[in-house]
């Protein structure tokens, strides 16, 4: 079974999970976010990259609101990969630059705190 066939097989299950989680927990739940990220992977497998990017964007909004920075970074990396698949290279570069800045802030703060303790 190829990637497209696997994605087609997984799609109805993912959509059902998304429907259940949205109904029980609302659109802004972490579970719905995980479903959307998985749906993005499935859409990528179907070469429906714009739909994948839409799902990724929705999930990133919720992850940001919940303050889940490590999951947000992973979602941004996924977004950059999708942007590359769409030929949106400048957007992908900007997304990756944003990730580097987001990661650099805590590292710089930790260095400052480390040096100030001496």
Image (tube, rainbow, N blue to C red):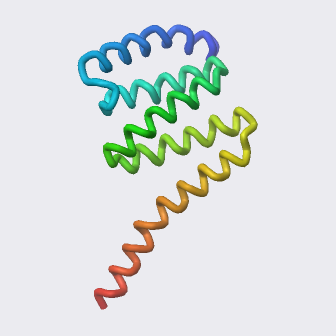
Estimate the x, y position of residue 69 in percent, counting from the top left.
39, 50
Q: Is residue 79 left or right of residue 10?
A: right
> From the viewer's perspective, is residue 41 above or below residue 61?
above
Q: Quadrant of the N terminus?
A: top right
**Vertical order, 116 against 12 (above or below):** below
Relative to 81, is 59 on the left or the right?
Answer: left
* Nearer to me, 26 or 46: 26
Q: Quadrant of residue 36?
A: top left
The residue located at (38%, 41%) in the rendering is 63
Residue appearing at x 28%, y 16% in the figure: 23
Is 47 placed above or below 76 here?
A: above
Looking at the picture, how far across and down is residue 78, in whole percent? 55, 39
Asked if residue 56 lies left or right of residue 44, the reply is left
Residue furthest bottom in the image? 118
Considering every residue shown, the one lying at the far left of the view is 24
Snapshot quadrant of residue 52: top right
Q: At x 49% / y 40%, what residue is drawn?
A: 75
* Quadrant of the snapshot with the C terminus: bottom left
| Residue 38 percent across, percent down from the top left | 46, 25
Number of numbered callouts drawn: 0
The residue sitting at 38% across, 81% down in the picture is 112
Would residue 76 appear left or right of 108 to someone viewing this image?
Answer: right
**Closest to the observer, 70 or 1:** 70
Q: Position of residue 2 (x, y in %)?
A: 64, 13
């Amino acid at each position: 079974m190829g990637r497209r066939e696997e994605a087609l097989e997984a799609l109805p299950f993912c959509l059902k999970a998304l429907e259940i989680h949205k109904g029980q927990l609302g659109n802004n739940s972490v579970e719905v976010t995980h479903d959307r990220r998985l749906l993005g992977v499935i859409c990528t497998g179907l070469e429906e990259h714009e739909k994948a990017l839409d799902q990724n964007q929705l999930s990133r909004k919720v992850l940001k609101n919940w303050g889940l920075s490590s999951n947000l970074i992973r979602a941004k990396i996924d977004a950059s990969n999708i942007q590359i698949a769409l030929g949106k290279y400048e957007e992908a570069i900007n997304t990756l630059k944003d990730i580097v800045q987001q990661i650099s802030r805590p590292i710089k703060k930790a260095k400052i705190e480390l040096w100030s303790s001496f």
